[in-house]
Amino acid sequence: MVSSVHFLFTYACLFECDHCFLFCSPSSKGTFTHKQLAKVFLDFKNIDTLSFVYFEGGEPFLYYAQILEGIRMAKEMGLKTGIVTNGYWATSVADAELWLRPLLELGISDISISNDLFHYGEEQENLALNALKALNRLKLPGDSICIDKPSITDEKDQEKGAPVVGGGVMFRGRATETLTEGLPTKHWNEFTECPYEDLENPQRVHLDAYGHVHICQGLSMGNIWKIPLSKLTLEYDGKTHPICGPLIKGGPAQLAREFNMFEEEKFIDHCHLCFTVRKALVEKFPEYLGPKQVYGLD
């Protein structure tokens, strides 16, 4: 059963990063209302295994009042809470403390701040540093998230010294369009597992305002506005899911094989292949693959 729920509170963001899983941008739609949030938290009472709630995006601080209310509701239920932000609001350390102090009072368990060149270029003021200093001053729990631009390295423990891609970027979402050029690839049939998500028994899911219950970004088990999360997670069977079933059986390669895709094409990694196959299937499985904007289609 699910132990942590991550709200994709909004797809809107002031940034439009090359590595973004979700194609977030200033023009992205889809934000939780207070009414929707309250409905989800009411259902949380039916999930005994739930212990942690995260608020992510997009950029959740764009809807600061609603986020504080969500954290308050979680606290009343005895749930731990966390938030992920790019720190755009930290125009100074003193200002950042004003933004963070209510989170301290609410007893937040973790604050993750994106601090890398994808968010703040070399010629920009890095506002994330102000946020991190304020975090330390207030003795709040948390740290920075840093992702480097993909690079090619030769690992000694790799078979025959084959080049591998470093940097921490996962090649799904916008990264498949912006960061793949020139990187080493393998034949698609080599990617025979999903190394990142437990598709049979997911412990973590992401919820968006459209109701999608993401097992992985863009891959849903169903819709909470049609069936409550507590019931969806209880009845979920990954092996019979039209997308997860093949992935469990033989990874992205099996998914591609079952839908007769590719011949000699090559891909960077498991995520690159999986995302590419799923993007081609969005129209065929709208209930399980969406929303379209996560695939750069809307």
Image (cartoon, rainbow, N blue to C red):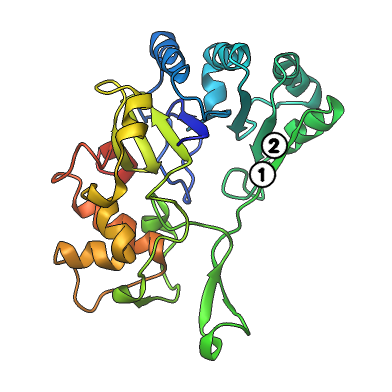
Q: Residue furthest bottom?
A: 160
In the picture, the disc for residue 115 is 1
Residue 77, located in which quarter of the rendered image?
A: top right
Asked whether, in this view, residue 247 is left or right of residue 52, the answer is: left
Q: Are marks 2 and 1 in contact (CB under 8 Å)?
A: yes
Distance (Cα) linking label 2 and label 1: 6 Å
Percent of width and height locating residue 206: 43, 35
Q: Residue at x 30, y 44 (%)?
A: 296
Q: Residues within 10 Å of mark 2 (few under 14, many from 20)?
A: many
Q: Nearer the viewer, residue 159 or 248?
A: 248
User: Picture quarter containing residue 144?
Assistant: top right
Residue 182 position in % (x across, y down): 43, 73
What residue did someone put label 2 on?
A: 128
Q: Is residue 184 above or below residue 223?
A: below
Which quarter of the figure has residue 187? Answer: bottom left
Residue 14 shows up from this direction: no
Q: Please state if 68 lies on the left or on the right of 201 as rendered.
A: right
